[in-house]
């Protein structure tokens, strides 16, 4: 008789299931199922949140008379000891105990006896894990918000340093108009501050307590959910027990905000990759943030922004994984939701790493000011200034636009810039042109002319920086 291709620790009918939930089962779990269903290999990451939630739950149970004060103290003290063991790396995680919750509860019972068996009174792993995940998401948001603030501060310093530096502004990746390099950095800052706002807005919806919803219907015990919410820093308890245990909107919303943040970092990366290439030469990345080639000794590769650009797809994938995970689930909790943690953890880790490396790299950029200025002088970047000059002389804008287009065409044939045309040549296209036109055709004149709130003149860039510094004090 051939042996089975996977071992089983017990034969059917053997009453030996040692799981904490195993009373109803006549067999031990198949080893294949044991390995397939375990989550402790990744959800152990929630240990801090799990212990904090359990301690608050125990205090509440004593408060309402379900536990004695001595039992609650034993539980809280035992969990403190387990916290220290895990932090020190000496805690023994067991796959057979499935997840972070059962590992900690089993260790607690082994440490303090029957009082540990009473901890799970009035709750389920369903509301327990939902609580842990909300605590984790809240912590992740707080971390990312702090990293964004640091990156925004670095951009502000760079913008201040380069407020007077001229670079070409692009549309369609074609040279459009001159802009201040500092103005460009402030644009990046606006993008990530919106990301910070989205994360903090998502935090409000994450910061509600599901604990006390039990498996799906609530509990028969006289629990005080508002007390537990206060203990854990939640704004209050969730309203509906069915929704509470099955909701993962907060995780999806976190990954959505993280995905958009990564899209912004990816756009920056694309610009940095272009700007640092010899074809542009606008910036130099610090050597310590670049790598070389295994075959071409001259290469200095912008690996950091390239990897950030690549990791953006990974975070967007995390969002898609959660959306697809949830799309077909009926109420209430389903085991599918074991798959919610890895995308959430991965999105958090990836975004945090990208923010850290950008926060260290960007303040150390070397801006090649003369190269940027030379590039801004190409592509007839002051053509719009000439059109605006004619409008101020009384010519309708569409006529001015046509006249300047013709002048650009003429300059193309001469392989020169508009500013290089003589006064007589410019007057061929409009008799309104006078000697003062050349003030408008310079790069600095173009920048200075855009002197209103939110525009690119160095004066306005400095005003924006001053506002941003006051804003940063309130963050």
Image (tube, rainbow, N blue to C red):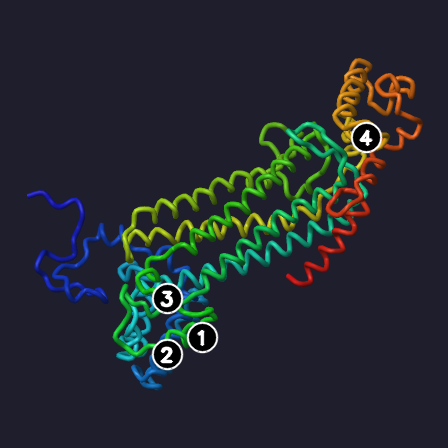
Percent from the top left, x then y, of residue 138? 48, 61
Q: Which mark is residue 231?
A: 1
Q: Is residue 148 left or right of residue 220?
A: right
Cα–Cα gap, marks 2 and 3: 19 Å
Within-10-Å neighbours for mark 3: few <14, some 14–19, many 20+: few
**Foreground pick, 11 / 382:** 382
Front of the two marks 4 and 3: 4
- Residues under numbered marks 2 and 3 in contact, where contact means CB atoms less than 8 Å apart: no
- Residues under numbered marks 4 and 2 in contact, where contact means CB atoms less than 8 Å apart: no
Within-10-Å neighbours for mark 2: few <14, some 14–19, many 20+: many
**Residue at image location 81% in from the left, 43% down from the top:** 164
Q: Secondary structure at mark 4?
A: helix
Within-10-Å neighbours for mark 4: few <14, some 14–19, many 20+: some
Percent from the top left, x then y, of residue 145? 57, 57
Cα–Cα gap, marks 4 and 2: 74 Å
Residue bearing mark 4: 391
Classify 173 as above or below 306.
above
Percent from the top left, x then y, of residue 186? 70, 47
Q: Secondary structure at mark 3?
A: loop
Q: Secondary structure at mark 1?
A: helix
Residue located farthest toward the right when viewing the structure as drawn? 435
- Residues under numbered marks 1 and 2 in contact, where contact means CB atoms less than 8 Å apart: yes
Q: Is residue 161 left or right of residue 270?
A: right
Residue bearing mark 3: 239
Q: Which mark is residue 204?
A: none
- Quadrant the C terminus occupies: bottom right
Cα–Cα gap, marks 3 and 1: 18 Å
Q: Is residue 464 left or right of residue 2?
A: right
**Residue at image location 66% in from the left, 63% down from the top:** 474
Residue bearing mark 2: 60
Front of the two marks 4 and 1: 4
């Amino acid at each position: 008789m051939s042996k089975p291709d996977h071992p089983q620790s017990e034969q059917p009918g053997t009453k030996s299931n040692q799981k904490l939930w195993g009373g109803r089962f006549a067999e031990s779990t198949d080893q294949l199922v044991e390995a397939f269903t375990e989550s402790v290999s990744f959800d152990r990451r929630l240990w801090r949140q799990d212990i904090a939630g359990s301690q608050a739950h125990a205090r509440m149970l004593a408060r309402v008379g379900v536990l004695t004060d001595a039992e609650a103290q034993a539980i809280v003290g035992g969990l403190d000891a387990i916290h220290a063991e895990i932090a020190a790396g000496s805690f023994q995680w067991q796959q057979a105990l499935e997840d972070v919750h059962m590992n900690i509860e089993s260790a607690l019972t082994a440490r303090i006896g029957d009082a540990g068996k009473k901890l799970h009174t009035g709750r389920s792993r369903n509301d327990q894990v939902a609580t842990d995940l909300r605590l984790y998401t809240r912590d992740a948001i707080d971390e990312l918000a702090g990293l964004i603030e640091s990156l925004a501060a670095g951009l502000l310093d760079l913008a201040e340093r380069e407020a007077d530096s001229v670079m070409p502004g692009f549309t369609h990746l074609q040279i459009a108009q001159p802009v201040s390099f500092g103005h460009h950095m402030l644009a990046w800052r606006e993008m990530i501050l919106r990301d910070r706002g989205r994360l903090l807005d998502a935090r409000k919806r994450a910061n509600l307590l599901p604990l006390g919803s039990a498996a799906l219907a609530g509990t028969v015990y006289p629990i005080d959910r508002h007390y537990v919410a206060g203990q854990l820093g939640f704004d209050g308890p969730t309203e509906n027990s069915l929704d509470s245990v099955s909701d993962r909107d907060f995780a999806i919303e976190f990954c959505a905000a993280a995905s958009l943040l990564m899209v912004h970092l990816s756009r920056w990366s694309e610009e940095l990759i272009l700007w640092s290439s010899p074809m542009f030469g606008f910036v130099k990345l610090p050597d310590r943030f670049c790598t070389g080639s295994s075959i071409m000794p001259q290469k200095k590769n912008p690996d950091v922004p390239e990897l950030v650009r690549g990791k953006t797809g990974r975070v967007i994938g995390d969002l898609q994984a959660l959306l697809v995970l949830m799309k077909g689930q009926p109420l209430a909790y389903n085991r599918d939701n074991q798959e919610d943690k890895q995308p959430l953890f991965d999105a958090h880790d990836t975004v945090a790493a990208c923010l850290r490396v950008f926060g260290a790299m960007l303040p150390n950029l070397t801006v090649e000011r003369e190269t940027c200025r030379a590039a801004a002088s190409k592509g007839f970047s002051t053509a719009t200034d000439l059109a605006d000059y004619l409008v101020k002389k009384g010519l309708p804008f569409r006529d001015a636009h046509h006249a300047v287009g013709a002048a650009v065409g003429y300059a193309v044939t001469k392989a020169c810039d508009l500013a290089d045309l003589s006064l007589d040549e410019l007057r061929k296209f409009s008799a309104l042109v006078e000697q003062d036109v050349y003030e408008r055709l310079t790069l600095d004149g173009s920048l200075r002319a855009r002197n209103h709130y939110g525009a690119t003149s160095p004066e306005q860039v400095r005003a924006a920086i001053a506002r941003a510094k006051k804003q940063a004090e309130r963050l």
